[in-house]
Image: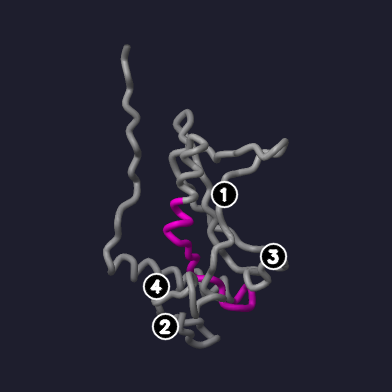
Amino acid sequence: MNTIAKKSVNAGKFLENQQVTNLLSNYKQNRWVDNSEKIGKEDSLTVSVSVEQLEMLIERIKLHGGDGVRFHFAAYPEEYAPQPEFAGRQTIIMVGTKSSEGANKEIYTSEGKNAQILAFGDAPMCPPFCGSGLGKTKSTSLVDRGDNGMVVA
């Protein structure tokens, strides 16, 4: 019997300090300023999750035959009752995936009669939660907001 070994695709890499600094600064200058102006408040810059939460997500993905995580950029609606501070701000959603027929497809689980996508989100963001806990961030930049002046972000 022939066995074909499944090879994992490694597309990412660890980044060096200067590349991280450049990417974050580029985002703040070229996207964050416009996003913040559009929503009328400082948009989020970071989303934080604990190692325990990531491990829990990974375990659940594996439990359902998955082998990956897709990170989606997303934005909360203008009215978001569960967490009003999140309203209008951007976030990320992590979705469990499974390799199938050369593609990474989302994992759905069954809860009774309803299929649910295996996704994790609603994690603390900065802003608005920058001062303490998981949302706390140490990275700051001086951002030029054009006619609206400068801001530390």
Say whether disc 1 or disc 4 marks the residue closer to the N-terminus. Answer: 4
For the residue carrying disc 2, how many other residues have a C-alpha within 10 Å: few (<14), some (14-19), or many (20+)?
Answer: few
Say whether disc 1 or disc 2 marks the residue closer to the N-terminus. Answer: 1
Indicate whether residue 139 is drawn in magenta: no
**Mark toward the viewer: 1 or 2:** 1
Mark 2 → mark 4, Cα distance in angstroms: 9 Å
Say whether disc 2 or disc 4 marks the residue closer to the N-terminus. Answer: 4
Q: Amino acid at mark 3?
A: Pro
The disc at residue 142 is 2
Mark 1 falls on what kind of element?
A: strand
Say whether disc 1 or disc 3 marks the residue closer to the N-terminus. Answer: 3
> In the rendered structure, which segment of residues is drawn in magenta?
37-55
Residue at 49%, 49% (x, y): give it: 57
Residue at 55%, 53% (x, y): give it: 120
**Which residue lies most toward the bottom here?**
149
Residue at 60%, 39% (x, y): give it: 108
Which residue bears the numbered disc 1?
119
Which residue bears the numbered disc 4?
25
Mark 2 falls on what kind of element?
A: strand
Work out whether 37 lies above or below 63: below
- Picture quadrant where residue 41 is located: bottom right
Work out whether 30 lies above or below 8: below
Q: Amino acid at mark 4?
A: Ser
Q: Along the horizontal axis of the image, is 83 left or right of 136?
A: right
Which residue bears the numbered disc 3?
82
